[in-house]
Image: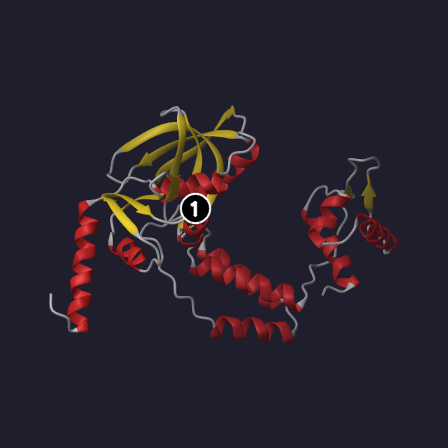
Amino acid sequence: MYSPTTRLLTVLELLQSYQQMSGPEIARRLEIDVRTVRRYIVMLQDMGFPVEAERGPYGAYQLQRGHRLPPLMFTDAEAVAITLGLLAMREFRFPVDVASVEGALAKTERVMPEKPLQQVRSLQEAIIFNTTPPPSLLHNDFIVTLSSAVQQCQQVHLQYLSWNGDASERGFDPYGIVFNEGYWYTAGYCHLRQDLRTFRLDRIISLEAQEQSFVRPEHFDVLSHVLHSIALGTSAHQVEVILETSMEEAQKIIHPIMGTLEETNEGIIFRRTTAQLEWVAHVLISLDFSVSVIQPVELREMLRHIAMKALRIAGDEI
């Protein structure tokens, strides 16, 4: 549990980091009530920090511009959190320059007291990340440019290389960015296709912000759209399987990233495109309810092959 002193310092850190922040927003982040936020603000003002408050229902707090603030102070837990975050960014090949990550780690260690310093170094020595980096690395600037475009609802112009090597260029309204299983994706409105599209960022050749703005659909779910696009993406085999169970039970087993589910009179239809049928076959074999393969034929043949192999292992006659 955070102590009042830690919360007070956190309020100061938030005011240092953001130009303005409302009382309800500070309260939400620190899991306290607005009245407690006001008390912390008064305490900071009493300590000499020039915190200004705008009155009214939409008022906000801010630090007076130009005031020189003291150095950052990290608690032990914050130092550990920062180190773990930087290590994860490095190992998962986040689109950040490696030298920047190492520099941030070195600077953080340089100002730490002995106790958190030892904790941080033990983390670096003890933790092993078993990760498989993507075959293509992402251009560092693309995330920054796209994030800014998403926030400002600003159109971008991109050149893109599809999975089969076809190059194209288009105007694009980015609605958000998703990191999924080692890859970065963006989803939004494509002016070339005049429809919603999902793009993998490591296939973007060039990216430039444009002056045109756009209006983002109010209830657009970026994550769901990207996962659905991945599940139905262009690949070698279109899988369709009938699951003889309820939608509730199917959803417990089939995660949205695995494919889509549709309720019909025959049962729940599972759909997915994939170049690798082995994992689909093994998932189907593990189910406790009846399953019927609609397509592809290759999946049926693979299931027969697995069944015969299982019989041989069990010593039964084929």
Report the quarter where the N terminus lies: bottom right
Q: Residue furthest front?
A: 265
Give the residue at x 72% y 54%.
31
Image quadrant assignment for residue 132: bottom left
Q: Where residue 207 appears, x then y in whole percent?
A: 41, 35
Q: SS of the residue at dot 1?
A: helix
Report the quarter where the C terminus lies: bottom left
User: Would residue 39 be found to the left or right of residue 230 on screen?
Assistant: right
Return the residue nearer the eye: 188 or 252.
252
Give the residue at x 76% y 54%.
32
Q: Where residue 123 appears, x then y in whole percent?
A: 52, 72
Q: Where residue 19 appears, x then y in whole percent?
A: 70, 42
> Looking at the image, what colour scheme do you see?
secondary structure
Give the residue at x 21% y 56%.
303
Q: Is residue 281 visible?
A: yes
Q: Is residue 200 visible?
A: no
Mark 1 residue type: Met
User: Would residue 167 be found to the left or right of residue 141 on screen?
Assistant: left
Return the residue nearer the eye: 222 or 153.
222
User: Would residue 298 be found to the left or right of residue 41 on screen?
Assistant: left
Q: Against 4, is 160 above or below?
A: above
Q: Which residue is mark 1?
A: 247
Q: Against 153, is 2 above or below?
A: below
Give the residue at x 48% y 39%.
222
Return the residue nearer the eye: 79 or 59.
59
User: Would residue 270 be found to the left or right of residue 74 on screen?
Assistant: left
Count of numbered badges drawn on the protein: 1
Crowdedness near tag 1: few (<14), some (14–19) or many (≥20) residues, C-alpha within 10 Å: some
Q: Where residue 227 appears, x then y in whole percent?
A: 41, 44
Q: Residue furthest left?
A: 318
